[in-house]
Image (cartoon, grey):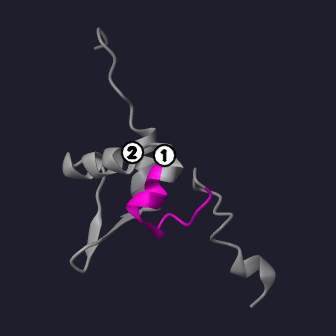
Amino acid sequence: MPKSRRNASVNAPNSILGLDPSTLLTVEEVAAKLKASERSVRRYIADGDLPAYRLGARAIRIRVADIETLMLRQIPTWGSS
């Protein structure tokens, strides 16, 4: 496989995190990308703010596209209409 094609997903142009948007990450990896705790990531999932996929009984995976959506979401400020 040519080098440029093999690394295409690493240099995805439409990705904030520089990853293919369909890539699945673990809770630990998401926490590292967001510079947050694993507990916070699990809370985002439990609150419905971050979609996640359960693989088997214990494994949870989150799509890069969903992480980026969470990062780009506008947070309302007090007093704004």
Give the class, few, some or many, for how many residues have Cα within 10 Å of label 2's Cα (few <14, many ≥20): some
Q: Amino acid at mark 1?
A: Leu
Q: Earlier in the sequence, mark 1 or mark 2?
A: 1
In the picture, which quadrant includes the C terminus?
top left
SS of the residue at dot 2?
A: helix
- Expressed as whole percent of the image width and height from the top left, the position of residue 20 reads 55, 66
Drawn side of residue 40 relative to residue 15, left or right? left
The answer to if 47 sits in the magenta stretch is no
Residue, x 70% and y 81% (percent of image)? 6
Drawn side of residue 3 relative to residue 41, left or right? right
Q: Amino acid at mark 2?
A: Leu
- Expressed as whole percent of the image width and height from the top left, the position of residue 78 reads 30, 12
Quarter location, residue 76: top left
Quarter location, residue 58: bottom left
Residue, x 20% and y 51% (percent of image)? 46
1 or 2: mark nearer the eye: 1
The single residue placed furthest to the top in the displayed view is 79
Distance between the Cα atoms at labels 1 and 2? 10 Å
The single residue placed furthest to the bottom in the displayed view is 1
Give the class, few, some or many, for how many residues have Cα within 10 Å of label 1's Cα (few <14, many ≥20): some
Q: Is residue 77 in sight in this rendering?
A: yes
State whether residue 81 is above or below residue 18.
above
Residue, x 29% and y 52% (percent of image)? 42
Q: Are marks 1 and 2 in contact (CB under 8 Å)?
A: yes
The residue singled out by tag 2 in the image is: 70
Magenta stretch in the rendered image: 18-31
The residue singled out by tag 1 in the image is: 34
State whether residue 10 is above or below residue 38.
below
SS of the residue at dot 1?
A: helix
Tally of numbered tags: 2
Q: Is residue 49 in sight in this rendering?
A: no
